[in-house]
Image: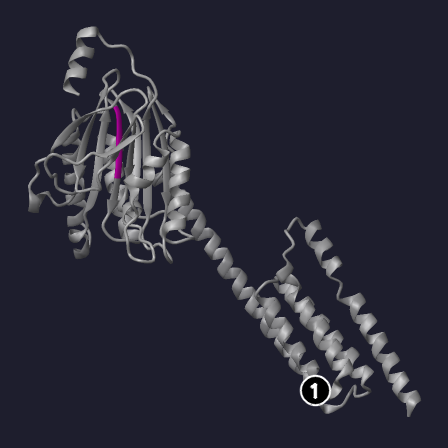
Amino acid sequence: MGLQVRGGIATRGTAVRSLGQVIAPKRLSRRMRDEGRPFEPALLIPLLVIVLASVAALFTPHLQFYRLLGATPALAAAMFSVAGTLGIGLLALIAGFAISAADHNLGQTPGNFTLLAVAASTLTAAYASRVRQNREHTLAEVRSVAETAQRVLLRPLPQHLEDIDVEVLYQAAAAQARIGGDFYEAMQTPQGVRLIIGDVRGKGLSAVEAASVILSTFRVLVVSAPDLPSLAGHMETAMGQYSRNMPDDALERFATIVLVEIPAGEPIARVLNCGHPAPLLLHGGEVREVEPSAPSPPINMAALLGDHYQVDTIPFTAGDRLLLYTDGVSETRDRTGTFYPLAQRVHRWALGQPRQLLDHLQQDLCAYVHGTRDDDLAALVAHRVTLPDVEPTERLMHQHSL
C-alpha cells in the first residue's frame, strides 16, 4: 500500500514537472518580445489557472479541481488571439491528460467528459476571440476616422501670431472620445489676430456637425470680414441655413461664442461675447472678468433675441493674457456641487507662461471634479508678448483712458 502511495506521489510529481515545462511564462514573454508586443502580467492569468487547478487536482483528486481547466480558454479569449486561445486550450487538454494519467483514470467516463468539455470550451473561446478581434479592428478604424475629424475640425493652432502667443487645452467628456461640441480657432488677418472659442448646445455627432458649420464659416470669412459683428452675422446666417436643411431638432441647436480681435500695434483687444462665459483678463498678477456691456445673442438665436452685437474694447498690452474657456471649465463641480472657482484658482498662476497656466488648470480640474465629467471643456490663452512703440501722444491718450 505504501509503495502505491509513493508511486502515485512520484507520478504526480512527474506530471507537475511536465506541466511546468509545457506552461512556461518566460517562453511566452520571450515570444511576445520577439513579436514586438508589450508583455502584460494579466496574460499569465489563464496559465496560472491551469497550473493551480492542475496542482490542486493532483494532490486533492477527490475535490475534482481539474474541471476548472475548462474555464481557461474562456479567459484566454478575452486577451489572446485565436491562435493564442487555441494554444491555451491545448495546454489545458495536455494538463487534463496528465492529471488523468497520474490518477490512473485515463479513458474513464469522468476524465473523458472533462477533456471533451475543455475541447468544446476551446473551440467556443476561439470563435469568441475572433469576434473580439473583429470588433477591436472596427473600433480602431472608427477611432482613426475620429482622429482625422479632430485634425480637420480642431486642427493644431499656431503658437505665434505676430506679437501674440497662443496655447490651447481641450478635453472631450468621454475618456475615449477625441472631439465634441466645444471648438476654437486663431488666425492672422489684416485687422489683427482674431480668435474664437465656442460651445454648441448638446452632445454627440450633431453637436460636432454644428460646430463644424460655425468653424468653417469663421475660417472662410475671418480675413474678409471688416469687423466682429459682421463675422458673427455670417455665422448666424450659416447656422440658420444649416438648421433649415436638417431635422427638426436642429432648429433648437445654438452655440455660444466669444470673438476676439487683437489689432497689431495697438494696446487693446476687442471682445464680442454671444452668451458665452466671460473671458478672464490677466494683467500684472491681477485677474478680472471681461463681462459684456450689453448682451449679444448666441449663434442661431438672433431670430428670437435680435441681431444686435456689442463689441467691448479692453486694454491689452505687453505681458497681458486673455483666457477664453467653455462652461466645461467653469461649471465643473466638486462632491458638494460647488462650481469650480476659476478666477480664484487662475490667480495663483497668473504670472506663469500660457502653457504652464493651462497645465496647472488641467491638473487642478482633474483634482477638483467629483465623479465623471459629463461635459467637454476647452480653454485658450492669448498672450501679448511685445507691443511696438506708439507715439507719445497716443501713449498719453491710452494712459488717460485707463
> Does the magenta run of residues contain 33?
no
Q: Position of residue 92 (x, y in %)?
A: 70, 74
Q: Residue at x 37, y 39 (%)?
A: 169
Q: Position of residue 351 (x, y in %)?
A: 36, 29
The extreme bottom residue here reads 1
Q: Which residues are magenta?
A: 193-197
Q: Position of residue 239 (x, y in %)?
A: 18, 43
Colour mode of the rendering: one colour
> Does the magenta run of residues contain 195?
yes
Amino acid under disc 1: Leu
Left/right placement of residue 3 relative to residue 76 reads: right
Q: Please identify the quarter of the rendering in which residue 302 is found.
A: top left
Q: Choose between 87 and 3: the one closer to the eye.
A: 3
The extreme top residue here reads 392
Question: In the rendered view of the protein, which quadrant contains the N terminus?
Answer: bottom right
Q: Choose between 382 and 242: the one closer to the eye.
A: 382
Circle 1 sits on which residue? 63
Q: Check disc 1: other Cα within 10 Å, few if <14, some if 14-19, many if 20+.
A: few
Q: Please identify the quarter of the rendering in which residue 198 is found.
A: top left
The extreme right residue here reads 3
Left/right placement of residue 331 relative to residue 19 reads: left
Left/right placement of residue 334 relative to residue 43 reads: left
Q: Residue at x 15, y 35 (%)?
A: 292
Assign a secondary structure to mark 1: helix
